[in-house]
């Protein structure tokens, strides 16, 4: 499991003077709002490291698997085979604590089956992270759990499989890969591989050669805009970087370089159109190996000439702000693209995006920090600095409870962990170590601040043939998702605005982070 030994020395900590007092373009950060005792990301002392590692153990807790199993079973009631899928869990109101189910054709449908497959991967490949299962059968048997997981995976993935030929969306990577690629890799199911390869071709059908991009959206409708022309407009979003992995993966299986070429061209086009170069923060002593980048959310191309017609945001605060989840998609997407291409241009982009994301976390206003319960340390520990605001430039409307997006943090952390692996392979152990520690810091802080405190546990019903059941640790206290404090969309012009909730892809990516640690031998 996770080591208690820090991988860097206390002497390598950077001075707190490296942190800046104001972020460019920020409406919320005043010169005196900078924390004075924030721990630098590149190193932590031994006691802080141990605390962080203790928190990360939650990634493999019984609470997580119990919550997922309960939702997987209960959401099938009057929904088998599924036509609706878990999307978000309200934190307030009459439906607080229960998953809202969204139509199966929505872009998030692949994440809940993906969560089941992440648990199945652990059950099959990493039994050491299921220590609470009694193999002698006095509580819940591991074989029963594996069997139930396998059945639930098949049930929830069936309708997703049927979507492999969709050409009405660019989100084929999000929809198909979390479950069907994992099924192929765990069980050698040729049907699942066929679905993955078909989905890649479906995605490639949306490529617009003159613009050098894959069309993301067919329409954009908000209070102040209505873009609907497939002839004169070509909408592309930074999120699209995450779907390129599907094309590269299929390209290798099919020995078809055209799919990889489309992905690489798209990534290069977005480098020039959605990534904004940022200056090194004034007064900062921290050296950045690569230029810093922020991101714009949406660009509208002329599909005939490839020229840029307009930049917009659909889910961020404004067009020139940095929407936190968009920045995170960029980090992870460019890290994946570098992994496939080994093109240093993409490595530089991923690192520049990551460094800017970390700098905005470090220079966020003091109100993001909250005191933790006493843990026996000499000084009061704080939490929340590394759980990002939903948009780094949006005004904080309520300083007692700043609006965050926990999904953005865990997505970015996954990208940084992948970056650390790539940099280690290049021999840049210093930067690799910094990104690994930054990723761990983000996830441990997210778990400490945003883990839903309403816990669940596994049980066995002897009256029903020892069927595995789930119960609340405290009766009546239930919250279906693992994390809280996610924000799907807080853009004031959008017609589908909802925030401060549990979110299925926040849970998917925090579980994926745990599985990444296992695959890399770091847990």
Image (spheres, rainbow, N blue to C red):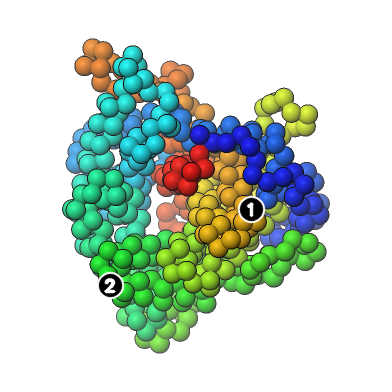
- The front one of 264 and 137 is 137
Residue 256: numbered disc: 2
Q: Secondary structure at mark 2?
A: loop
**Residue at the image point whose x is 22% and y is 41% from the top:** 154
In the image, farthest residue toward the top: 463
Give the image location of residue 241, x and y in percent: 43, 65
Name the residue beneath numbered marker 1: 434
Where on the picture, by quarter, is residue 83?
top left
Give the image location of residue 356, x and y in percent: 63, 61
Q: Secondary structure at mark 1?
A: helix
Where on the picture, by quarter, is residue 193?
bottom left
Whether residue 103 is visible to the viewer of this picture, yes or no, is no
Disc 2 from disc 1: Cα separation: 36 Å
Give the image location of residue 62, x and y in percent: 43, 27
**Residue at the image point whose x is 78% and y is 43% from the top:** 37
User: Is 63 above or below relative to 415?
Assistant: above
In the image, taking residue 396 as reference, residue 184 lies left or right, namely left
Where on the picture, by quarter, is residue 428?
bottom right
Q: How many marks?
A: 2
Of mark 2 and mark 1, the one earlier in the sequence is: 2
In the image, taking residue 187 as reference, residue 379 lies left or right, namely right
Mark 2 is surrounded, within 10 Å at the Cα level, by few (under 14), some (14 to 19) or many (20 or more) other residues, namely few
């Amino acid at each position: 499991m996770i080591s208690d030994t820090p991988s860097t020395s206390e002497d390598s900590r950077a001075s707190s003077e490296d942190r800046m007092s104001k972020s460019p373009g920020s409406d919320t950060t005043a010169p005196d709002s900078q924390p004075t005792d924030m721990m630098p990301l590149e190193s932590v002392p031994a006691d802080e490291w141990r605390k962080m590692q203790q928190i990360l153990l939650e990634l493999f807790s019984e609470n997580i698997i119990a919550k997922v199993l309960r939702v997987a079973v209960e959401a099938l009631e009057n929904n088998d085979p599924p036509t609706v899928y878990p999307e978000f869990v309200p934190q307030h109101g009459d439906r607080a604590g229960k998953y809202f189910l969204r139509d199966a054709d929505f872009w998030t449908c692949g994440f809940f089956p993906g969560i089941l497959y992440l648990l199945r991967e652990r059950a099959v490949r990493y039994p050491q992270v299921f220590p609470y299962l009694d193999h002698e059968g006095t509580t819940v048997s591991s074989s029963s759990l594996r069997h139930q997981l396998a059945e639930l995976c098949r049930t929830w993935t069936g309708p997703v499989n049927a979507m492999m030929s969709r050409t009405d969306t660019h989100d084929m990577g999000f929809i198909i890969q979390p479950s069907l690629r994992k099924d192929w890799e765990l069980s050698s199911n040729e049907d699942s591989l066929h679905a993955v390869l078909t989905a890649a071709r479906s995605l490639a059908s949306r490529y617009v050669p003159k613009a050098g991009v894959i069309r993301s959206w067919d329409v954009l409708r908000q209070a102040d805009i209505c873009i609907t022309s497939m002839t004169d407009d070509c909408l592309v979003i930074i999120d699209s970087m995450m779907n390129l992995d599907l094309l590269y993966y299929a390209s290798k299986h099919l020995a078809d370089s055209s799919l990889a070429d489309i992905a690489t061209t798209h990534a290069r086009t977005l480098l020039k159109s959605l990534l904004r170069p940022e200056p090194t923060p004034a007064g900062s002593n921290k050296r950045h190996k690569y230029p810093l980048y922020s991101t714009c959310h949406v660009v509208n191309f002329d599909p005939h000439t490839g020229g840029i017609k307009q930049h917009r945001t659909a889910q961020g605060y404004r067009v020139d702000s940095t929407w936190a989840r968009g920045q995170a998609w960029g980090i992870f997407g460019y890290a994946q693209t570098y992994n496939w291409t080994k093109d240093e241009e993409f490595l530089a982009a991923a690192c520049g995006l990551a460094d800017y994301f970390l700098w905005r976390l470090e220079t966020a206003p003091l109100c993001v920090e909250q005191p933790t319960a006493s843990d026996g340390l000499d000084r009061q520990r704080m939490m929340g600095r590394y759980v990002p605001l939903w948009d780094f430039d949006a005004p904080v409307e309520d300083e007692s409870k700043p609006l965050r997006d926990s999904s953005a943090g865990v997505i970015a952390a996954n990208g940084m962990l992948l970056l650390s692996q790539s940099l280690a392979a290049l021999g840049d152990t210093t930067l690799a170590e910094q990104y690994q520690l930054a990723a761990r810091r983000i996830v441990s802080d997210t778990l400490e601040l945003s883990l839903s405190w309403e816990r669940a546990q596994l049980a066995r019903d002897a009256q029903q043939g020892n069927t595995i059941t789930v119960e609340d640790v405290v009766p009546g206290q239930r919250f279906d998702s693992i994390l809280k404090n996610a924000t799907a969309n807080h853009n004031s012009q959008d017609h589908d605005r909802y925030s401060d909730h549990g979110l299925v892809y926040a849970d998917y990516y925090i579980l994926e982070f745990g599985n990444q640690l296992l695959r890399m031998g770091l847990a």
